[in-house]
Structure formats: structure tokens, C-alpha cells
Image (cartoon, rainbow, N blue to C red):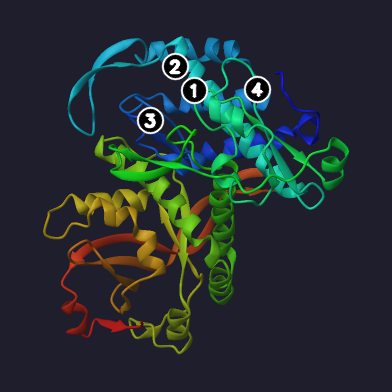
């Protein structure tokens, strides 16, 4: 691929492990969608989705083909040759009239085609490469602290991308949070990482802060308004590598709480407050497609369980003072982590379907992680035993039930092999809309926070 730039660190071979790890982590979260705008911006950093895939059993096939393309360096032809017969056999090919799951409107839509496979391949390969490159940039920025924007200067280059060519800024400059390529469909731009010595040797200078003009974009699928930098396609105005690092780092950090003591889990969670925004978004992006699947009467089969919070100091103190009584005996905590499984999501969803008088809305279920980090109150249920989190349920109050010392099996790497092992955790299992007076007017519950 031709470039207008002199060679820098960009032309050293990129270790494929970073791009492979990025795509492998995304592959644990497959999201069916109808419109490319249903999964928006940073959500793409932690999940794999394909527009018009809703209602078809194709995501595992597409993800496997993309994973192999990333790991093995498959060409577009090899990717398409492998995937085309599978998609055709499952009916995801050509033009068909189908109802939009969001509106019910029947439209003629394009399913699989050579052009669509090219877009799927191109976009995912570029995003994986960008995320892997950003991980390397972050590792090496101490010795090479600058990035230079590099556009392919030919007749296909977007005018503003051409104008950005040569922009040289520190790695941590805010401009890269929105302008780190790719910056649109089929964008071929890249960056060159440079040291101070490189700048001097090549005669480059650090650029003045770029002027960023934005335009408002309304996503009618998610009812969101977004300020998009001019020259960047809607949906691309974020740094894929940075978003991936944030989401996966939050998940990895919180995952360590399962094996930590309650006190250590609380301390680690308190010190990890800076990853909570990324954790919340990561959990939202995980829950949403599973609720979509349940609404489409599809079972959840992976058995995945995520850490979504930790017990706060007030709860630990309550247990430490021996006040958590059940059946006449004090309950001792085994873990400080709060987890949610796919089975738990399904149980919350089924409870929500039982009747409007007691239902937690889909939005409340999706945002359960918010409630666990910032509850209105926490009570001890002496009969279960369980912790009850009082939450805002959108016009009313709701409770989330967290069973303490819940024993389950999880998949884990043991002696180099993926095996199942037993853990004890605090399990978010159910929730209802309630009258909060119930908590205050009965001896079954004791307020902790």
C-alpha cells in the first residue's frame, strides 16, 4: 500500500498476537442486529455484530471466519470462499423481504452478497489491526511518544483525510481519541509512531492543536444524538483501540475479584473506580444482545458469567460484626464479588414477563450494574439469605436480589486446559418492582446502607 510518508515504526511488522487477542476477546460477545446503527460506536470494540443478522443463526459462522482471517492472515477471497456456502445454506443470501424487529415494517433488504462480505471483512480487519496497533503504541510510547497521521494520497482519498495527512501530535493528545484511523467505511488511513530522534531526523515538527469542527448526528435506531467530527463517518468517531483496552481491561480487572477475599475484593474494587464507566458499558453491551435473543425465543447457551460489582465496605462491616443472621446463625462471606450469569439474565427476563405490576423494565435489567455500584439502599433478607439492593426502576422502586455464598461452576484455564471449577460468589439472580415501605415495615429485612 503506497504512502506519502517516510518509513517510521509503522513499517515494522506488527505482532499479530495483539490483533488476534483483540478479536478473540470480542468473539465472546456476539450481537445479532438489524441495522448497523443498532450497535453504536464503542459497543463495536467489545462485540462482533453484522447488520441484518437478527433472526438468522449465522453469527458464530461469521465470527469463526473472521477469527481465522485475523489469526491466519486470510485474504478476502479465502474468507468469502469459506463463508459463502455456509451463509447460503442458512438462507442468509441475496435480497429478501423481512420485517424490521424494531418497527415491524416489512422491507426488502440485502442479506449476504460478495459486496457485503467485503465490507464485513474490510471493516473488521481494519478495526482489529487498529486495536492491536494501539496496544503496541501504548506499550512503546515512552520511547516513541508521537503519532503522525498518514493518508493514502490518491484519487479515492477523502478531502479532510488528505488535509489531516502529516498531522503530528503526542500519543496521548485528545485528537487521537476521535481521529485514530480508520475514520470511516473503507478508510485506508494509518499512523506512524515516532520518537523524538525520528522527528529530528525526518525534519518533522509537532503540529498545532487541530481545529475540530463537529456535526450533530441523530441515530434514530438508538434515539441518540452524537457530535461527530467533520470528515469522520457516523459510527467511527472513536478510537477502537482505546475503547477495546478500556472495556477488556475493566473486564479482566473485575474478573480477578472472584478469587479474592471479601476485604481484598472491596479494596481492589475501590481502587478500580476509574474503570467503572468502561465496566458499565461493557456489561450493557453484554446484556443487551442476550435480552434480544430471549425476546426472539432463543436460548442462551454459552453459560458465561461476568463480575459486575463488589460488595461495599458497609456490607463487609455488617457481616464482620456478625449481624448477618439466617436460621439463628451468623453468615460468613466467602467472596466479595457480585456476578451475573446468562442464566441470571434469563431469570430476570422471565420475571419481567410475569406481569406489569411486578416487572423490572428491560432498561432496568440492562442497567443493573449501575444500581449495584450506586444503590439507593441495601437490605439484608434474613430468610433467604440474600442482599436486596433498592434501585430506581423508572418511575418506581425496584429490588435486585443478590444471593450470598452461591456455589456454581465456571470455565477456567487449569494446567493449560479449559476446565470447569467450583467457585462461591454473590449471585445477582432476580428482581422486581416493589413498594419500598415493605423493607421498613417488617422484621424480615434489616437495612445495611
Marks 1 and 4, Cα distance to the nearest angstrom?
A: 21 Å
C-beta proximity under 8 Å, tags 1 and 2: yes
Q: Which of marks 4 and 1 precedes in the sequence?
A: 1
C-beta proximity under 8 Å, tags 1 and 4: no
Marks 4 and 2, Cα distance to the nearest angstrom?
A: 24 Å
Q: Tell me the quarter of the image containing the N terminus.
A: top right
Marks 1 and 2, Cα distance to the nearest angstrom?
A: 6 Å
Helix, strand or loop at mark 1: helix
Is residue 295 in sight in this rendering?
yes
Q: Is residue 299 above or below residue 338?
A: above
Q: Which of marks 3 and 1 precedes in the sequence?
A: 3
Helix, strand or loop at mark 3: loop
Check disc 1 and report the residue beneath it. Answer: 120
Is residue 416 in sight in this rendering?
no
Marks 2 and 3, Cα distance to the nearest angstrom?
A: 12 Å
Q: Is residue 415 above or below residue 309?
A: above
Q: Is residue 319 above or below residue 64?
A: below
Check disc 2 and report the residue beneath it. Answer: 116
**At x 29% / y 37%, what residue is drawn?**
221
Check disc 3 and report the residue beneath it. Answer: 36
Residue 430 position, x and y percent, is 29, 60
Check disc 4 and report the residue beneath it. Answer: 152
Q: Nearer the viewer, residue 117 or 60?
A: 117
**At x 33% / y 45%, what residue is drawn?**
225
**Could you classify mark 4 by the number of other residues whose Cα lies within 10 Å: few (under 14), some (14-19), or many (20 or more)?**
many
C-beta proximity under 8 Å, tags 4 and 3: no
**At x 22% / y 19%, what residue is drawn?**
107
- Rendering quarter of residue 113: top left
Count of all numbered marks drawn on residues in the image: 4
Q: Which of marks 3 and 2 precedes in the sequence?
A: 3
Marks 1 and 3, Cα distance to the nearest angstrom?
A: 11 Å
Amino acid at each position: 500500500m503506497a504512502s506519502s510518508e517516510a518509513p517510521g515504526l509503522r513499517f515494522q511488522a506488527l505482532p499479530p498476537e495483539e490483533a488476534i487477542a483483540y478479536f478473540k476477546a470480542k468473539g465472546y460477545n456476539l450481537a445479532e442486529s438489524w441495522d448497523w446503527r443498532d450497535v453504536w460506536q464503542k459497543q463495536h470494540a467489545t462485540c462482533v455484530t453484522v447488520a441484518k443478522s437478527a433472526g438468522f443463526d449465522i453469527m458464530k459462522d461469521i465470527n469463526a471466519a473472521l477469527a481465522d482471517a485475523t489469526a491466519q492472515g486470510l485474504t478476502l477471497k479465502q474468507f468469502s470462499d469459506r463463508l459463502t456456502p455456509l451463509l447460503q445454506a442458512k438462507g442468509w443470501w441475496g435480497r429478501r423481504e423481512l420485517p424490521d424487529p424494531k418497527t415491524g415494517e416489512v422491507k426488502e433488504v440485502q442479506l449476504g452478497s460478495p459486496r457485503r462480505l467485503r465490507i464485513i471483512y474490510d471493516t473488521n480487519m481494519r478495526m482489529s489491526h487498529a486495536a492491536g496497533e494501539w496496544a503496541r503504541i501504548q506499550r512503546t510510547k515512552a520511547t516513541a511518544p508521537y503519532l503522525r497521521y498518514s493518508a493514502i494520497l490518491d484519487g479515492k482519498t477523502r478531502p479532510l483525510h488528505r488535509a489531516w495527512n502529516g498531522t503530528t501530535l503526542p500519543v496521548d493528545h485528545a485528537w487521537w481519541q476521535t481521529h485514530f484511523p480508520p475514520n470511516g467505511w473503507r478508510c485506508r488511513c494509518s499512523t506512524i509512531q515516532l520518537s523524538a530522534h525520528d522527528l529530528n531526523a525526518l525534519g518533522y515538527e509537532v503540529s498545532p492543536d487541530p481545529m475540530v469542527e463537529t456535526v450533530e448526528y441523530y441515530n434514530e435506531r438508538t434515539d441518540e444524538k452524537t457530535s461527530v467530527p467533520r470528515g469522520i463517518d457516523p459510527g467511527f468517531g472513536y478510537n477502537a483501540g482505546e475503547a477495546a483496552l478500556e472495556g477488556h481491561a475493566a473486564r479482566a480487572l473485575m474478573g480477578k475479584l472472584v478469587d479474592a477475599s471479601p476485604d481484598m475484593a472491596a479494596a481492589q474494587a475501590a481502587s478500580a473506580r476509574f474503570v467503572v464507566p468502561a465496566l458499565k458499558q461493557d456489561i450493557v453491551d453484554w446484556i443487551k444482545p442476550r435480552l434480544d435473543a430471549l425476546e426472539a425465543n432463543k436460548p442462551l447457551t454459552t453459560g458465561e458469567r461476568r463480575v459486575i460489582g463488589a460488595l461495599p465496605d458497609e456490607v463487609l462491616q455488617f457481616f464482620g460484626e456478625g449481624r448477618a443472621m439466617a436460621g439463628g446463625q451468623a453468615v460468613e462471606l466467602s467472596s466479595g464479588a457480585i456476578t451475573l450469569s446468562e442464566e441470571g439474565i434469563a431469570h430476570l427476563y422471565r420475571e419481567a414477563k410475569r406481569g406489569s405490576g411486578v416487572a423490572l423494565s428491560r432498561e432496568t435489567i440492562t442497567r443493573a450494574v449501575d444500581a449495584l455500584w450506586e444503590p439507593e439502599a441495601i437490605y439484608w433478607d434474613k430468610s433467604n439469605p440474600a442482599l436486596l439492593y433498592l434501585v430506581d426502576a423508572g418511575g418506581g422502586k425496584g429490588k435486585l436480589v443478590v444471593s450470598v455464598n452461591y456455589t456454581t461452576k465456571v470455565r477456567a484455564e487449569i494446567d493449560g486446559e479449559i476446565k470447569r471449577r467450583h467457585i462461591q460468589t454473590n449471585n445477582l439472580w432476580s428482581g422486581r418492582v416493589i413498594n419500598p415501605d415493605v423493607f421498613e415495615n417488617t422484621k424480615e429485612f434489616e437495612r445495611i446502607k
